[in-house]
Amino acid sequence: MRYIGVSNFTGWQLMKALAISDKYKFERFVTLQALYSLIARDLENELVPLSLDQKLGILPWSPLGGGFLTGKYRRGKPRPEGARRTDPTNQFLQYDEEKGFDIVDELEKTAREHGATITQAALNYLLRKPGVTSVIIGAKTKEQLGDNLKTTDWEMTPEEVARLDELSKPPRAYPYWMLERTVQDR
């Protein structure tokens, strides 16, 4: 079996690892396993373009943002007891929950259009992103697994992806905003 992947690398670490593989004629990595979801799109700054350029598949972990993108956390509603995000002060995954609630609302609209669930819409979105070859799901029950698998029964439209892209757009970090700005001046 030929599975060679890396996880949680920065862009320069990934390029260095690929260069070492090439130099010493080792097997090249074929996939990047990284945090990627509608509430964690930082990967798009460097690692998605790098993965596409180097022909690496992207295998997102936590595609549902620790359960947040399932719809069980809703604005103004009590948090479910015993869930990962029950205590909002003690979170492994850090993101703007208010923005996340807006994303969940849009996922609900999209899911409704397809007779699907919010979970399926969140996973379906990632499967439409360039370079994403699959997603790592973390189903705890047989019902959750069945729901996750139904994600592949339908496809989100490009317009739906674009709406979610705009709504979930991450803030631009330097040097990206500067590069975008200088292109406008040309």
Image (cartoon, rainbow, N blue to C red):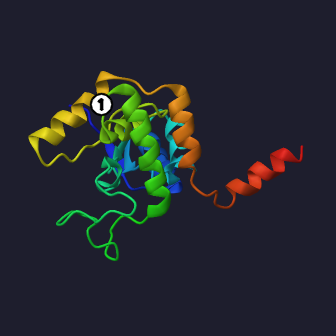
Label 1's element?
A: helix
Q: Is residue 117 left or right of residue 102?
A: left
Quarter of the image for residue 177 reads bottom right
- Check the image and name the residue furthest to the front: 76
Position of the C terminus, as image quadrant, is top right
Give residue 162's position: percent from left, percent from top: 57, 35
Residue plotted at (51% across, 43% down) = 48
Q: Residue at x 47, y 34 (%)?
A: 129
**50 or 27, which lies in front?**
50
Q: Position of residue 47 (x, y in %)?
A: 51, 47
Q: Position of residue 40 (x, y in %)?
A: 45, 54
Relative to 152, residue 52 above or below: below
Looking at the rendered structure, the kind of residue marked 1 is: Thr
Count of marks overlaid on the render: 1
Residue that label 1 marks: 151
Q: Is residue 45 above or below residue 134?
A: below
Q: Is residue 164 left or right of residue 101?
A: right
The residue lying furthest to the left in this view is: 142
Residue at position x 64%, y 57% in the image: 172
Q: Residues within 10 Å of mark 1 (few under 14, many from 20)?
A: many
Q: Nearer the viewer, residue 115 or 94?
A: 115
Work out which residue is located at the far right of the displayed protein and give it: 186
Q: Is residue 42 visible?
A: yes
Asked if one can make out residue 57 in the rendered structure from this viewpoint, the answer is: no
Q: Residue at x 80, y 52 (%)?
A: 181
